[in-house]
Amino acid sequence: MNLSQLAHLVALLETGSFTRAAESLHLSQPAFSRSIQLLEAELGAPLVDRIGKRNEATPLGRQVAQRARRVLAEVHEIRREAEMLAQGQTGSVALGLGAAPSALLSVPLMRRMLHAHPALRVKLSRGPTDSLLVSLRERTLDALVVHVRTLDNDADLDVAPMPALASGFVCRPGHPLLKGARPSLPQVLAYPVMSTGLSPEIARRVAAARPDGFALHRESEDIACLLDIAAQSDAVFLGVLASAAAQIADGALARVPPPADFDIAAHFAFVTLRGRSESPATRIAREICFDQIGLAAGELPPS
């Protein structure tokens, strides 16, 4: 017994004619009749009574046809859902974001998903890379966007680098660092510095500029909080400039002219488990994330 035979039986009972049923399915009548005969032989009883030119279902034929309609309807739904999944019209994606990626991606990702793929379910989780990696490996997250510096060279990860984003210092308008000549790095570091954390390279460079010792004044995953403090104090924020683009554009913050020899960039990556099939929803999320990071890389505030 197969789906074609069930569909043939349903068509026969709906049309009442071997000829019309065969034509509706684009089959020859001998092939169609053979299909019905094979189904009857497998079930061990006739499914159709041939009464003159009429064909009527036997009691078994009615029961089989009733179940066949349900089976065929379920198969149709399975195929429809598979097609919708393949086209990204349904499904879900769970994405883990580091602090800076969260500040850049959360709103535009949600907005674009809602506009272009309203049936997709989206879950965003923010946190440190270590905890996000645990969730990725437990398969409660489908992918991560995190800073490359927070990753080890783990063999089970596929790491797709994203466009580099300029980083630097941000302060309030009217800050002493904005007056006069371009400040040196030691002059900037004389003020309280806030960040989500420093890469080993940046930590080494600021330590060299402050031989008397340097430590972050405030360290937090909440970039919005750090930017708010920078707007209301003499503390400066060190991080991805694009994360402060809106505040710079409306005049709430300003970019500190980059000190000489301190042109730095942030490098994010889209991370998945190696060997794990990527769902259409995850593929869509990947494309949007790369688009948004690309836009951020091209929309940096002027120095």
Image (cartoon, rainbow, N blue to C red):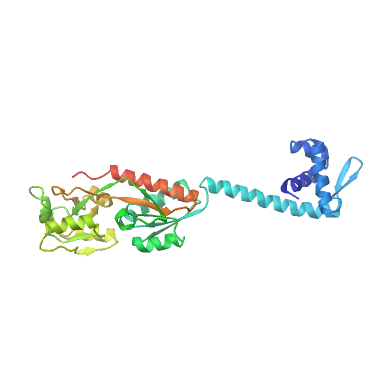
Q: In this rendered view, identify the residue nearer to me: 214 or 74.
A: 214
Where residue 168 appears, x then y in whole percent?
Answer: 20, 51
Residue depicted at x 8% and y 47%: 181
Residue depicted at x 38% and y 61%: 132
Question: Left or right: where does residue 284 sit relative to residue 193?
Answer: right
Q: Is residue 279 visible?
A: yes
Residue 135 picture quarter: bottom left
Residue depicted at x 52% and y 53%: 91
Residue 239 picture quarter: bottom left
Where residue 60 appears, x then y in whole percent?
Answer: 83, 54
Question: Left or right: where does residue 204 sit relative to residue 130?
Answer: left
Residue depicted at x 19% and y 53%: 169
Question: Left or right: where does residue 151 sit relative to residue 177?
Answer: right
Question: Left or right: where does residue 275 sit relative to residue 77?
Answer: left
Q: Is residue 114 visible?
A: no
Q: In this rendered view, identify the residue nearer to me: 138 or 243.
A: 138
Q: Residue furthest left?
A: 180
Question: Height in image: 192 above or below 37?
Answer: below
Q: Residue furthest right?
A: 52
- How many tags in the picture? 0
Where residue 50 appears, x then y in whole percent?
Answer: 89, 44
Where residue 77 appears, x then y in whole percent?
Answer: 63, 50
Q: Quadrant of the C terminus?
A: top left
Q: Residue furthest front?
A: 155
